[in-house]
Image: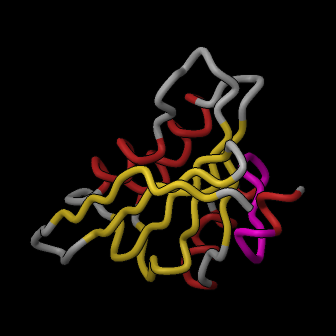
Amino acid sequence: MDEEHVAHTNEETEAGPLSVDRATVDGVTVVTVSGEVDHHTSGTLRQALTPDDLADKARTVADLSGVAFMDSSGINVLIAAHQAHGPVGWLRLACVRRTVLRTLEIVGLTTLIPCYPSVSDALRD
């Protein structure tokens, strides 16, 4: 896989740090997120998951393996990011921890945004 590092953001908040790394793998943006996603940190996640060029066929995989907690702010970010990818692009989630996945399932988000067990699975499907 051709990998190119794009950006790294660390935001310290009252709830703790949120670390976001963006890389490009075979033309797909891979966003690796670590920390807690809540109303203090959701803006950082929103910025990282918003496609750079909305007119393009944006494709993004969000690696959530480092996210142990996500509140409704994070859910709203994922919905907005899904919508921002438009009808020809896509957003996929990978490595979602069981506690976060359960929340996504309860609100029905897993029927809107596909979840994969690994980043490589999300990239090849």
Q: Is residue 96 left or right of residue 112?
A: left
At horizontal 36% and vertical 53% (from top left) the residue drawn is: 7
From this viewpoint, which residue is outermost toward the right?
125
The residue range painted magenta reads 111-120
Q: Specify the quadrant of the image occupied by residue 18.
A: bottom left
Q: Quadrant of the N terminus?
A: bottom right
At horizontal 18% and vertical 75% (from top left) the residue drawn is: 15
Query: Can you give x and y, in whole percent of width and height, for residue 19 in the image?
Result: 31, 69
Q: Quadrant of the C terminus?
A: bottom right
At horizontal 62% and vertical 64% (from top left) the residue drawn is: 104
Q: Is residue 125 left or right of residue 118?
A: right
Q: Nearer the viewer, residue 28 or 81?
A: 28
Q: Is residue 7 left or right of residue 92?
A: left
At horizontal 77% and vertical 55% (from top left) the residue drawn is: 114
Query: Can you give x and y, in whole percent of width and height, for residue 45 in the image?
Result: 37, 53
Query: Can you give x and y, in whole percent of width and height, for residue 9 in the image?
Result: 27, 59
From this viewpoint, which residue is outermost toward the top?
55
Q: How is the image coloured?
A: secondary structure
Query: Can you give x and y, in whole percent of width and height, for residue 37 in the image?
Result: 35, 66
Q: Is residue 95 above or below residue 10?
A: below
Give the number of callouts.
Answer: 0
Q: Nearer the viewer, residue 104 or 28?
A: 28
State yes or no: residue 6 in magenta.
Answer: no
Q: Is residue 36 above or below residue 54?
A: below
